[in-house]
């Protein structure tokens, strides 16, 4: 039996380390699925299991845990950057600026409340209290990447390795943080006298409005000798306007034209275009006619289909320029990217891997599928090289020192900020330099969650040794109480303001709060009471900027205020 005892006690063995992390992660994930009052802590429960393991002495060499912690953090934030990068710019369009301003205000208020609690309830002469309050802040706003960024920044400020157990404060504040976000959102409902049924009716009215250009259908006879013998694609490119030819009558035979279909003199065609382009297109192709082969387009069955963008020619093209409604007779009702639902605004730029939900006549939807590619096998090969190239550049970028007056040490974006920013950049513009950043949602989630559980397990195991003392004989109860204040006060200020000042729909506000606090449980609750997509839109609009600011401000607080 000695071999079994050694497996659990010999800390230097690879088998022991693998067993330790596997047990902590597996148990944490299983316990995190347990719901109390419909709410669960999810993968964050790995942190609490790690704390328990560390408390009973089930641990590993510190150097190994440091490596796994930092590598997990890099992988986690980089995959987040790839996820939010393509939608980062789009998040500021069509009402997004106001929502993001509200999110920035909430983030600033979180920080101000944290400092207020620090000066009111803690001994400011003790150098450990402010870093511990930073841990409380990120537990209160349920943001794990910010905790990692703060811990990494502390290593720059205290290179001799002064140990601050931020994870203990984070763990104290996190549970009430999850509950507080939902509870404060419900309090806003009563403060603003919100009626769920009325809000849902308003959403339906807004979603019924068609934001696309008015479509125009016309029957034309080809009378321009210049286009005789040229393909539909060549004609469209020459016009520099978006047109769709849905029927062509050639030598008495009616057919469905494709991109390589050639026009000949005397052909009769049915053209769909934007109303504003109709006159120019008619002047170029030929006169309008009364066709005797008119078909009943309405007889086609209406379908809703998810279409995958695999055509590289679509990379960077905006939804508004393709004129789905005007040209193709369909509506794009949803855009999903890396598991996030993005608002289908006309300024949205497509990227390979986007999945769009298209509603319209079956034939028209099939045309859109051909245009967008919709060939999933093209996306099956993972782009591993892009990930590690981005991580290399991110680490180098994060290591660059920026000297700022008043700071005790040069500012470095570090292992959290550097990879995050680079991932956002290549996620949005990487295709311009030949980097294919597409990754399936499941692959992105797998790598992201893998990095997260490595980070949480490492942090928890290292924090376990002193956690009980922190909670019982230390300031644990203070962290719980102040964390709750950090959670709810900004929501109770920003949400009513957004409602009164900008008249945002309540469900949009709930989504905005969930995205600002990067809290999926709060979004899940908002979606359960919202009949439309308002909550998801609010969440995805502010999530990219909020995640970036949470990580960046964590480092700024440590570097500016925690130096000695």
Image (cartoon, rainbow, N blue to C red):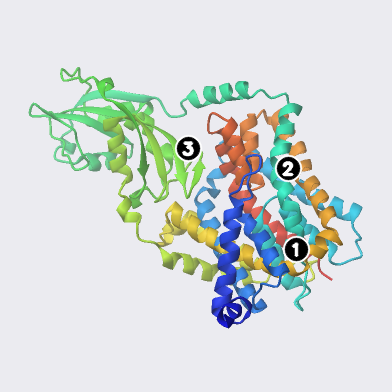
Mark 2: few/some/many CA within 10 Å (<14, 14-19, 20+): many
Q: Which residue is mark 1?
A: 166
Q: Which residue is mark 2?
A: 180
Q: Nearer the viewer, residue 461 or 246?
A: 461
The residues tagged by marks 2 and 1 sit, at their Cα atoms, a distance apart of 20 Å
- Residue drawn at x 77%, y 64% as measured from the top left: 467
**Left or right, residue 104 beside residue 296:** right
Say which quarter of the image contains residue 440: bottom left
Q: Nearer the viewer, residue 329 or 121?
A: 121
Task: Please tell me whether mark 2 sits on a helix, a strand or a loop.
Answer: helix
Going from N to C along the chain, the mark reached first, 3 or 1, is 1
Which corner quadrant holds the C terminus?
bottom right
Q: Which residue is mark 3?
A: 344
The residues tagged by marks 3 and 1 sit, at their Cα atoms, a distance apart of 40 Å
- Residue drawn at x 76%, y 28% as measured from the top left: 191
**Left or right, residue 189 beside residue 547:** right
Mark 3 against mark 1, which lies toward the viewer? 1
- Residue 385 lies, in percent from the top left, at 42, 68
> Which label was assigned to residue 196?
none
Q: Nearer the viewer, residue 408 or 31?
A: 31
Mark 2 against mark 3, which lies toward the viewer? 2
* 2 and 1 marks in contact (CB < 8 Å): no
């Amino acid at each position: 039996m000695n071999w079994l005892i050694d497996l659990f006690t010999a800390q230097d063995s690879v088998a022991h380390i693998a067993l330790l992390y596997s047990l902590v992660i597996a148990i944490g994930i299983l316990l995190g699925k347990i719901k109390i009052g419909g709410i669960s802590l999810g993968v964050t429960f790995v942190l609490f299991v790690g704390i328990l393991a560390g408390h009973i002495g089930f641990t590993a060499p510190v150097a190994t845990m440091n490596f796994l912690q930092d590598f997990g953090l890099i992988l986690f934030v980089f995959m987040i950057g790839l996820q939010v990068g393509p939608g980062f710019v789009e998040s500021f369009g069509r009402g997004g600026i106001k929502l993001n301003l509200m999110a920035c205000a909430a983030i600033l208020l979180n920080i101000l409340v944290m400092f207020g609690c620090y000066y009111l309830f803690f001994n400011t002469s003790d150098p450990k209290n402010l870093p511990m309050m930073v841990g409380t802040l990120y537990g209160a706003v349920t943001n794990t990447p910010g905790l990692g960024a703060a811990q990494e920044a502390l290593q720059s400020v205290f290179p001799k390795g002064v140990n601050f157990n931020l994870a203990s404060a984070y763990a104290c504040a996190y549970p009430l943080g999850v509950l507080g976000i939902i509870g404060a959102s419900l309090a806003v409902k009563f403060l603003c006298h919100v009626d769920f049924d009325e809000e849902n009716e308003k959403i339906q009215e807004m979603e019924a409005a068609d934001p696309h250009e008015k479509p125009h259908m016309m029957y034309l006879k080809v009378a321009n000798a210049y286009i005789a013998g040229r393909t539909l694609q060549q004609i469209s490119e020459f016009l520099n306007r978006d047109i769709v030819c849905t029927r062509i009558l050639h030598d008495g035979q009616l057919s469905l034209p494709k991109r390589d279909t050639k026009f000949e003199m005397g052909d009769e065609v049915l053209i769909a275009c934007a109303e504003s382009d109709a006159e120019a297109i008619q002047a170029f192709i030929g006169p309008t006619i009364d066709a005797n082969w008119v078909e009943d387009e309405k007889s086609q069955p209406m379908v809703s289909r998810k279409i995958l963008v695999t055509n590289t020619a679509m990379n960077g093209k905006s939804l508004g320029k393709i004129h789905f409604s005007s040209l193709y007779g369909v509506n794009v009702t949803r855009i999903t990217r890396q598991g996030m639902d993005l608002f289908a605004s006309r300024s949205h730029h497509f990227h390979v891997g986007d999945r769009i939900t298209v509603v319209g006549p079956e034939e028209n939807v099939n045309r859109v599928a051909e245009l967008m590619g919709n060939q999933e096998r093209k996306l099956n090969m993972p782009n591993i090289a892009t990930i590690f190239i981005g991580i290399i550049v991110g680490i180098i970028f994060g290591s660059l020192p920026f000297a700022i007056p008043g700071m005790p040490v040069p500012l470095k974006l570090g292992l959290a900020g550097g990879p995050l920013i680079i991932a956002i950049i290549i996620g949005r513009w990487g295709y311009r330099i030949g980097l294919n950043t597409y990754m399936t949602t499941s692959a992105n989630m797998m790598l992201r969650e893998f990095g997260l559980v490595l980070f949480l397990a490492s942090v928890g195991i290292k924090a376990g040794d002193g956690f009980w003392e922190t909670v019982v004989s230390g300031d644990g109860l203070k962290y719980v109480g102040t964390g709750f204040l950090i959670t709810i006060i900004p929501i109770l200020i920003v949400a009513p303001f957004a409602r009164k000042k900008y008249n945002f729909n309540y469900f949009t506000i709930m989504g905005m709060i969930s995205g600002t606090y990067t809290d999926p449980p709060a979004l899940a609750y908002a979606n359960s009471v919202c009949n439309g997509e308002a909550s998801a839109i609010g969440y995805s609009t502010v999530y990219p900027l909020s995640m970036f600011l949470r990580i960046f401000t964590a480092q700024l607080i440590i570097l500016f205020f925690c130096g000695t």
